[in-house]
Amino acid sequence: TAKKMVGWARKYGIQSTIHTGGPSIPGSGLIGADVVLEADTDVIGHINGGHTALPDDEIRCICEGCKRGLELVHNGNERSALYTLRIARDMGDLNRVILGTDSPAGSGVQPLGILRMVSMLSSLGDVPAELAFCFATGNTARMRELDCGLIEVGRSADFVIMDKAQHSAGKTILDSVQLGDLPGIGMTIIDGIVRTTRSRNTPPATRVPEIVGH
């Protein structure tokens, strides 16, 4: 059975994710709460649907019936994402919330998909922006057992330096995200090396870092 296969994978350190919701391609089928709970995978993939979400009572059943990761995605049902977020918050389980894009899909590939999820969940889900960023970073790193996503000794030196977008109504980057604006990325550092400077995809940042020496 699926649960046995998931158990074998977990035994050997392999994570598993399950499709959740309506069919995504012709020939595939609905994956409802009963199947999700029976399989008991490590991550409930796009619990807000990719593309079609489950009814609210089934989403609640999944959230309450297991303690696995709850992935909220850009290419899904935004109302259902906010509903899942409220349930996780009420249960004191925000540590289970991780973010994804579920791309490529019919809605395309979103280079800013994760930032848009952070902004959407914060501005419409009544979550402080710093917590929404944690869904995309620390929560995802711990859930996926990644070497990045957290600033700790021994982890990869990967950083995204960003600031509020120019002319945003927010006073700080966190204020601006809480208001629904995207931040402006000024630099990315991967493995301790500057890989990119000002982003051409995000709105221009108010402050941009400069390299002053080597």
Image: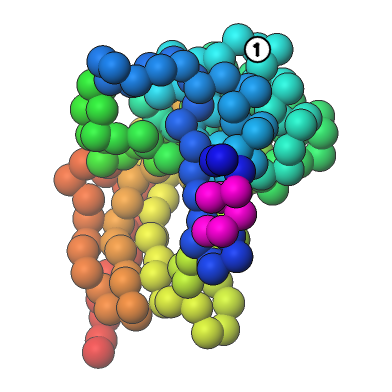
Residue 69: quadrant of the picture: top right
Q: Residue at x 22, y 69 (%)?
A: 195
> Foreground: 138 or 23?
23
Colour mapping used in the image: rainbow
Compared with residue 211, is residue 21 higher up or lower down, i.e. above or below?
above
- In x, y percent, where is residue 188? 30, 64
> Residue 57: percent from the left, percent from the top?
70, 12
Return the residue nearer the eye: 87 or 212: 87
Query: Could you tell whether 138 is left or right of 204 in the image?
Result: right
Q: Is residue 158 a member of the stretch shown in magenta?
A: no
- Is the C terminus in the top left, top right, bottom left or bottom right quadrant? bottom left
The prevailing secondary structure element of the residues shown in magenta is: helix
Residue 8 lies in the magenta-colored region? yes
Left or right of residue 44: residue 112: left
Q: Nearer the viewer, residue 141 or 174?
A: 141
Q: Nearer the viewer, residue 158 or 78?
A: 78
Q: Name the residue rendered at 54%, 68% in the picture.
A: 12
Looking at the rendered structure, the number of numbered marks drawn on it comes to 1
Specify whether residue 138 is in view.
Answer: no
Q: Is residue 207 visible?
A: yes
Residue 111: x and y in percent read 26, 41
> In the image, what residue occupies the spot 29% across and 35% down?
103
**Quadrant the N terminus occupies:** top right
Q: Residue 210: where, in percent of width, then height?
A: 27, 70
Q: Residue furthest right?
A: 91
* Span shown in magenta: 4-9
- Identify residue type, mark 1: Asp
Q: Which residue: 34% across, 80% down?
A: 192
In this view, which residue lies farthest toward the bottom? 214
Is 76 drawn above or below residue 210 in the view shown?
above
The residue where tag 1 is placed is: 56
